[in-house]
Image (spheres, rainbow, N blue to C red):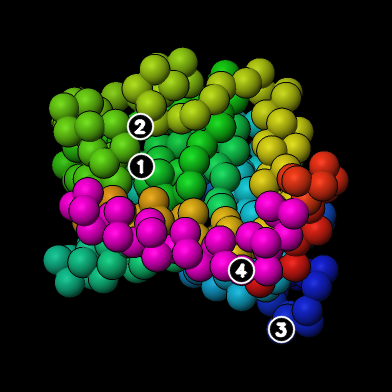
């Protein structure tokens, strides 16, 4: 499937396991292996890395929506067939490759919204955790089942999940390896909102367009403030916030947004 962007010209990229399109400032990336429940094999990890690498530098993509093809799965997990006979060096390399993808998604500099439309297990749950936030269908199921296979999460799940839901809840989920229903994931704070399956994609698309209408400079500053602050103590986070507030407030978009508010009109942002 060719990846065609609206906006500046990009090299033509041919993906076997992904679909991607951009409209109204929103890039929609769909993992497209429905016959395999969109499992993350090595090729799919590589294609996602290439795709997100392009989206990160494409100004036409202001917000990214990540989802899975078909009604059953967001991403059901890693391809177990690839894991069955790994040696230590191969397993380490695979984990680092998966972690690099998750880091790219998490630190893209643009909001990435996971539309969790079905199973998000193992690597699929870790991929959702790397997104800015998650909306889920009522039919979604999420979990990190690796311990039941004699494994542990290797694509960032042991690090991102405790930071999101707390140490105790994360350890219970990882050690038990159980699947959560969408309402359970919502109660835990793993997802932000649960919707009927038929409404999920439309609701996420509307949300993404709403966010994409804001200044991309402002969105980047907000993302950097939150992500940077999580890795610092409160005092360090506040210093970083003040610096990023100064960048936003002194920007053309900061001035325009305040003028538009005072003049009671829509803001016209130019992303600088």
Residue 13 vertical position relative to residue 41 in the rendered view, above or below: below
What separation in Å lies between label 2 and label 1 (alpha carbons)? 6 Å
Q: Which secondary structure lies at badge 1?
A: loop
Instruction: From the image, tell me which residue sits under label 3.
Output: 11
Q: Which mark is residue 251?
A: 4
Residue visible at 65% across and 55% down in the picture = 63
**First in residue order: circle 3 vs circle 4:** 3
Residue visible at 60% across and 64% down in the picture = 217
User: For the residues carrying marks 1 and 3, which lies nearer the camera in this image?
Assistant: 3
Q: Quadrant of the N terminus?
A: bottom right
Q: Which secondary structure lies at badge 2?
A: strand
Closest to the observer: 194 or 76? 194
Which residue range is magenta in the image?
233-259
Closest to the observer: 181 or 60? 60
Is mark 2 in CB contact (under 8 Å) with mark 1?
Answer: yes
Q: Left or right? Give the position of 19 relative to 66.
A: right
**First in residue order: circle 2 vs circle 3:** 3
Specify the quadrant of the image occupied by residue 176: top left
Residue visible at 61% across and 68% down in the picture = 251
What separation in Å lies between label 1 and label 3 (alpha carbons)? 32 Å
**First in residue order: circle 4 vs circle 1:** 1
Q: Is residue 239 magenta?
A: yes
Q: Which mark is residue 143?
A: 2
Q: Quadrant of the C terminus?
A: bottom right
Residue 198 vertical position relative to residue 94 in the rendered view, above or below: above
What separation in Å lies between label 4 and label 1 (alpha carbons)? 41 Å
| Helix, strand or loop: magenta stretch | helix
**First in residue order: circle 2 vs circle 1:** 1
Decide: few, some or many residues near mark 2? Use Cα within 10 Å; few <14, some 14-19, many ≥20.
many
Instruction: From the image, tell me which residue sits under label 1.
Output: 122
Q: Left or right? Give the position of 252 relative to 122.
A: right
């Amino acid at each position: 499937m060719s990846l065609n962007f609206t906006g500046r010209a990009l090299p033509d990229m041919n993906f076997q396991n992904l679909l991607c399109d951009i409209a109204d400032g929103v890039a929609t990336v769909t993992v497209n292996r429905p016959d395999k429940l969109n499992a993350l094999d090595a090729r799919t990890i590589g294609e996602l890395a290439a795709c997100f690498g392009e989206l990160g530098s494409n100004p036409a993509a202001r917000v990214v929506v990540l989802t899975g093809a078909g009604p059953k799965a967001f991403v059901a997990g890693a391809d177990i067939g690839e894991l069955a006979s790994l040696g230590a060096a191969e397993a380490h390399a695979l984990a680092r490759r998966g972690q690099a993808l998750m880091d790219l998604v998490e630190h893209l500099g643009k909001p990435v919204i996971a539309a969790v439309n079905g199973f998000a297990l193992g690597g699929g749950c870790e991929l959702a955790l790397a997104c800015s936030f998650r909306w889920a269908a009522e039919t979604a199921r999420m979990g990190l089942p690796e311990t039941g296979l004699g494994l542990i999460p290797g694509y960032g799940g042991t690090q991102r999940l405790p930071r999101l839901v707390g140490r105790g809840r994360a350890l219970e989920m990882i050690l038990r390896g159980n699947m959560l229903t969408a309402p359970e994931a919502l109660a835990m704070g793993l997802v932000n909102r649960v919707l009927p399956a038929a409404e999920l994609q439309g609701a996420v698309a509307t949300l993404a367009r709403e966010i994409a209408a804001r200044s991309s400079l402002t969105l980047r500053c907000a993302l950097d403030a939150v992500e940077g602050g999580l890795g610092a103590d409160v005092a360090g986070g506040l210093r970083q916030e003040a610096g990023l507030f100064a960048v936003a407030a002194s920007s053309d978009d900061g001035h325009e947004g305040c003028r538009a508010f005072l003049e009671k009109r829509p803001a016209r942002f130019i992303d600088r």
